[in-house]
Amino acid sequence: MNTLATRLLCGLAVLLLAPGLAFAQEGTITGTVTDGETGEALPGANIEIAELGMGIASEADGTYTLEDVPAGEYEVRISFIGYQTEQISVEVEADAVAELDVELLSDAAELDEVVVTGLGVEQTRGESNVSVSSIDAGELSETSEFENVTDVLQGRTSGVTISRSSGNVGAGLRFDVRGGVSLNSDGQPLIFVDGTRIAQDPATGFDVGGQPTGSPLADLDPSNIESINVLKGPAATSLYGTDGTDGVVLIETKSGEQGQDLQVNYQGTLGSAVKQEDYNDEIYPTADRLNDIHRRGAIQGHRVDVSGSFEDVNYQLGYSHRNTESIFPTGEGERNNVNANIEARPTDAFTINSRSTLAFNYYSRPQSDNNIFGVLGALALDAPFGAFTERDSSAFFAIDDQQRVRKFQQSVEMSYNPEALSGLTLRAQGGADITARRNDQTWPNQYQDIYISSGGERNALDSDRRRFNVDLTATYDYDLTSNVNATTTAGSQLFTESDRFVNATSSEIGTDLIRDIGAGTQLDVIGEGLSNERSAGIIGRQQFEFLDRYSLEFSVRRDWSTRLIAGETGSFKEWYPAARASAQLGDFLPDVVSRLNVRASWGQSGSLPNLVDGELVRLNGQSSGFGTGATIGNVGNPDLELEQVNEIEGGFDLGINERYSLSVTYYRQNTEDSIVNFQVAPSTGFGNQTVPRNVGEIFAQGVEMDFGVTVLQTEQHSLDLNANYSFRDREVRELGGETIFGGFQRNVIREGLAPFSFYGPKVNGALFAEDGTYLEPDVGDDNVELGNPVPDHFGGFGLSATLFEDLRINAQAEYQLGHQTYGSTARFLTLIGANEKRNQLTEELAGLEPGTEEYRSVANNLARTNPSAGAGEIDNFLQDADFLKLRSVGVRYDASDLISSVTGTDQVRSFTLGFSASNLFTITSYDLGPDPEVNFDGSRGVTRGQDFLTLQNPREYTFTLQVGI
């Protein structure tokens, strides 16, 4: 301990005295940087010694000379846009010249990008045997500012769409990964942050209309993320077992680099959030008031991090704070993250890595969505009749919903490569995700007449969520022959999760000066919940590589889960096999083809029943006037099996002229034994209960394409373009004759339709009397598929550019096609007679002669605005929601050289100014609401694509200042 303290004190002294020190023994490094294939000089290549803060750019002929280098051994980093970075160890002697000529290899237009293909296995994209979407979040955050993880992913991942259910700060997130063919999961992928499996579903809490508590991903600081890899189907995720059915998202945070000198970085952010679009004044008579109620929310953020290395330890320590005001007057979010990432190498064979995050976050949410106390609803539905008074407004805004989140996330990874057995790697990783959440909701006493309640009301809920995972693997890499390499992996995964909450509601709190829940004279609700579940898996994987060109892989996983099986003390068990193969065929093709990887894979996964679905009967405790008893809480099926999902995937990755890349993937997914609930017969005595059965079958197929091109690459300028496109086709083939309905019975899961389809009678136009007078809408007799909230076609395109070395630009757009959104707000507005469009059509029709073409045309349009329940209202207020959105634009100017020349000092390592914007514009035909992406019922469940008084997602503008020393 004394030795470490001495070293730290000495290091601090050296840091403080560094500007005045002069090294007596110095040397020089010189050489040439060239293209590794053509031999051409690379002017403007960067040659750096990070630990000394020294660097230089190569001349027009590729030569460079780095002078006044203190004697010693250093890691020299050589980089050039469009080429793979090299890091080479160089010994510098006093008064001597060290020669270092470097040949850089082309980056092969993204095909040499490293992706994670599961359980820590890293391969280049051009060698991978499965399709993986990889995002360099660290590079994106250098040019763009992101509010949350969603902003990083949108438009950049083929086969995946991500959306926020509302514009609330910290709102719920929904992933749609490929076909999403599991009925029994929540449709969301597993999420790992630095190897720690985190909770991805909303925590227990009070709703504010339709929106539950926010997504746990909103608690993360996106500026601290280095990379994101998305594994998209069982062909890639079978090694993750049952829980990997809907994909796996692997997030890695930033860390220090070996050999890096001490660096301190500060980033400050100022900005604002505004509404994206106005309400349509042709439909909403109070559009001005609806638009005016939105505000310009302030955004302020600060981040400080310290990174570096000493001896065999590298580290990064950081603190970030961000405060974001909602575009609605009563919403706000505050995020505070402390992170510490430390990697140590006590010996050449042993590495230990610790990554910790501590979060203190606060959120306040307005009442909105399907909610009679929401201001948006009052303005849209009550205001036309003058019912919404100033006092009503004050009462609605006074409803206070606060959340306080305390989150601790820890990952520890140890890796050992014993010298006695070359090729063997032993790896152990443990993770903990612990979250404590407090949710308070207060309804003031002074407005009890408006709330129609018995005095003031207080609601309080405390929840505790704990997730622990352990991964143990042993990997042995060896040669079978001179042409055949093999890798054998064996391991296990252990996971346990527990959720506990207690909640209470009291009312008749006589004064708003007291906020103690115990002050209420009436206890309305008191309850608690506890669940605990454990799962385990043993994995085996065998890989073969032939001639460094062909690869073949087989894997299997055995899963156990503690979800209950009636009459047994054991658990659900299942095998999940997979096979993958790839071939590098570029060497057989003309030189213009720099890379061709052909791949195919098959994998199996599944989904478990609900926790007690395997028990015949589960009783709940119930109090009554006659004492405590029991009621039937759940009816299960002792013969229930797991849902099975099979996927085959094939594709290729192509590189042309080291500048163009194209990846194409086709997949087919088939789900069998999906669990469907059936109403039980009255004669069973189980009452209004359902029993689960294995009868469901769903099919999906799709195509995914990614394209990249380096358009320009010179010493000072570069331009890279990217694009992706995806298509998916889904069909429910078997449900045992049952239909699963979502909210308001608009979304269904039904045989012959895609999941979540809008379902109801078709409106054909108007019906007329014999004299040509309009009677009513002509509505079909049968319910039919009217649309779907999930897009069939989707993707994105963007660019990354560098101008004059110091100016960087990044932009990304996203499009979604072939889906619909239901305008429930417009429908309710029409029900109360306040739809401006319908009223104008009614007036216009009254002035026309029945039987004329113009009369019939107006009558048909009027019929298509009919809001009556069961009379075509779903079809009438269902609108195409295709859109093109400019998701993000980022511009950063590196003024480091300018600052150095003005101040005459090189103590400032970096100085950049930036501007970012998100959701900059939207092109869409949807005009029943301001945002086609929202959903009033949150981010889970069957109810999808229903816009009902939901706060739109904001447009954000931010300015940043980054200083590094």
Image: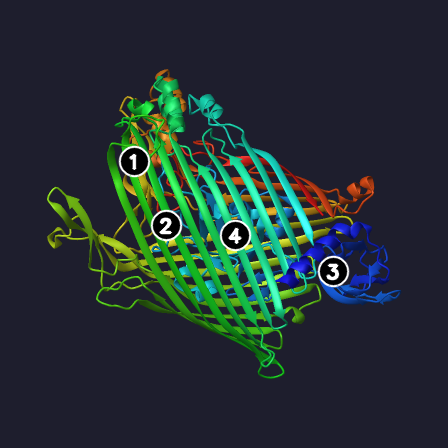
- Mark closer to the observer (2, 4): 4
Whether residues under marks 4 and 1 lie with C-beta atoms below 8 angstroms apart, the answer is no
| Percent coordinates x, y for residue 462 in the rendering | 36, 44
- Mark closer to the observer (4, 1): 1
Residue 605 is marked as: none
Indicate the secondary structure of the residue bearing disc 4. Answer: strand
Picture residue at 47% right of the left edge, 25% below the top? 293
Q: Mark 1 or 3 closer to N-term?
A: 3
**View extreme (front): residue:** 2
Q: Residues within 10 Å of mark 1 (few under 14, many from 20)?
A: some
Indicate the secondary structure of the residue bearing disc 1. Answer: helix
Picture residue at 55% right of the left edge, 40% below the top? 322
Q: Amino acid at mark 3?
A: Arg
- Mark closer to the observer (2, 3): 3
Q: Mark 4 or 1 closer to N-term?
A: 4
Residue holding disc 3: 77
Q: In the image, 658: left or right of 958?
A: right
Q: In the image, 140: left or right of 519?
A: right
Q: Amino acid at mark 2?
A: Pro
Residue holding disc 1: 518
Residue holding disc 2: 755
Q: Residues within 10 Å of mark 4 (few under 14, many from 20)?
A: many
Q: Amino acid at mark 4?
A: Thr
